[in-house]
Image: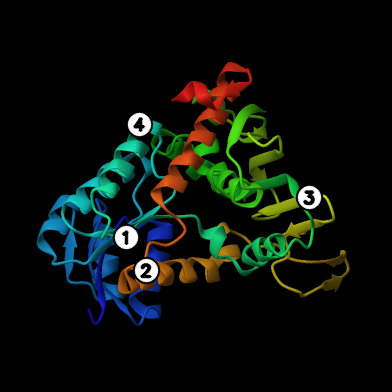
Amino acid sequence: MSKVRIGLAGLGRLGKEYAQNIQYKSPDAKLIAVCSLAKDELEYAKDKLGVDMCFSSFEEMVEKSNLDAVAILTPTKYHAQQIIFSLKNGLHVFSEKPLAISIEDCLKAEKEAKKHPDLISCVGFVRRYDESYMDAKKTIEKNKIGDPFFVRSQTVDKDTWAPFQVDYVKSGGGIFHDFNVHDADLARWFIGSEVKKVWSLGGAFRFKEFGDLNDADNTFAFCEFENGKMALLGASRTSSYGHDTFTEIIGTLGKLTVGNPPFKNRLQISDKNGFRYECNETFYDRFKDAFLTQIHDFINSILNKKQNQCTLSNATKATIITTAMTESFKTKKIVELKDLG
C-alpha cells in the first residue's frame, strides 16, 4: 500500500479540518472521496480539496470508491452504524468521539470490530495526542508524583458557540456525551481504574434553551473509581473569554497541571487595560497539532498493521461513564455504573 486511500464523511467545521490534514499534511494518505448531505460542503471538497468522488450517501461512498479506510465526522447518532457498515465492507475506521450515544450501540460496534481483527478501528480522543497530556502520562509512569488519586478535568467552550450547540444536543446526546467524554477518558487513563459511581449536578443557567431540551450549559460530576480514587469533571458552554480545557492530577507526592491558565501562547500584552494573556478561541485552536498527530497515528496504524491506543473498548467505557453522568443529572441521584449493564 503506497498511500492509504481515505473517504471522509461529514464536512462540518471539524470535518473540514480533518480533510485538510489528510489531503495536504499526510504524505502517506490521500483523500479520494467524501460524503455530505450539504451541497455547499460537496462543492468545498471539489474546489478546495480536489476530490472528484462526492456522495450524499455514506453507503454509496463506501461501496463505490475503492477505499482502504474511512474517517467519520458525522453527528454522533450515526457513528456506530457507519462504523459497522465500514468494517463489514473491509475498511479501516476512524471515528470522531463519542462512539455512540447509547451503550447498546457501542457494544454492537465493538462486537463487529472483534470479527475483523485485521482492521484498525479507533475513536478520536485527541487529548491523548497532545504533547502536554502525553508528558503528564509519562510523568505519572515515572512515579514523579507518586500514586495519582484525584483528577480534576474540565471542557469549557466560548459562549459564542452555544447557539450552534443547541441543535447539536438532539443528535449528540447532550453536554456529558459531547464535552465530558474527553475528561472521562483522561480520568480513566490517569487513574488506571474504572468508574464505580457518579453524581452529577448542573443546569441551564444562562442559555435556557438547553434546559428546554433537558440538558444544561454548566455541569459538574463527581466520580468514584473502583480502586477508591476520585475525579471531578466539569463542563461549560458559557465562557466569555475563550476555550478553557484543563486537567489537574494530584498524587501522593505531587501534582500535575495541564492547560491552566489557558494561555494561547507565551505572549503577555500590556496596554491601557493592564496586562493579560490571550486565550484560544476554540478547541481546535488548542489541539490543532494533536489533531494532526492523531490522524497520522491512524494512518501509521494501518500501514504497520497495529491497533493504536484509542480502541472502541476505551470509547465504550467513556460512554458508559457519560451515560451514568447524564442519568445522575436527570434523576438528581447517585448512579452506580453496574446498574447500566
Tell me the distance, in whole angstroms, between the alpha carbons under discs 3 and 4.
Answer: 34 Å
**Which residue occupies 18% across, 58% down?**
90
Amino acid identity at mark 2: Ser
Amino acid identity at mark 4: Glu
The quadrant where residue 282 appears = bottom right
Badge 4 vs badge 2, beta-carbon distance below 8 Å: no
Tell me the distance, in whole angstroms, between the alpha carbons under discs 2 and 1.
Answer: 7 Å
| Position of the C terminus by quadrant | top left
Colour treatment of the image: rainbow
**Which residue occupies 49% across, 26% down?**
213
Q: Is residue 206 above or below residue 127?
A: above
The quadrant where residue 208 appears = top right
Query: Label 1 belongs to which residue?
Result: 120
* Residue 301 - label: 2
Q: Which of marks 3 and 1 is nearer the N terminus?
A: 1
Query: Label 3 belongs to which residue?
Result: 250
Q: Earlier in the sequence, mark 4 or mark 1?
A: 4
Tag 2 secondary structure: helix
Query: Label 4 belongs to which residue?
Result: 104
Observer-nearest residue: 241 or 60? 60
Badge 4 vs badge 1, beta-carbon distance below 8 Å: no
Q: Is residue 330 above or below residue 7?
A: above
Q: Earlier in the sequence, mark 3 or mark 2?
A: 3
Q: Which of marks 2 and 1 is nearer the N terminus?
A: 1
Tell me the distance, in whole angstroms, between the alpha carbons under discs 4 and 1.
Answer: 21 Å
Tag 4 secondary structure: helix
Say whether residue 214 is left or right of residue 79.
right
Q: How crowded is mark 2: few (under 14 residues within 10 Å), some or many (20 or more)?
A: some
Does residue 154 appear in this view?
A: yes
Q: Residues within 10 Å of mark 3 (few under 14, many from 20)?
A: some
Residue 64, x across and y down, in percent: 10, 61
Tell me the distance, in whole angstroms, between the alpha carbons under discs 4 and 2.
Answer: 27 Å
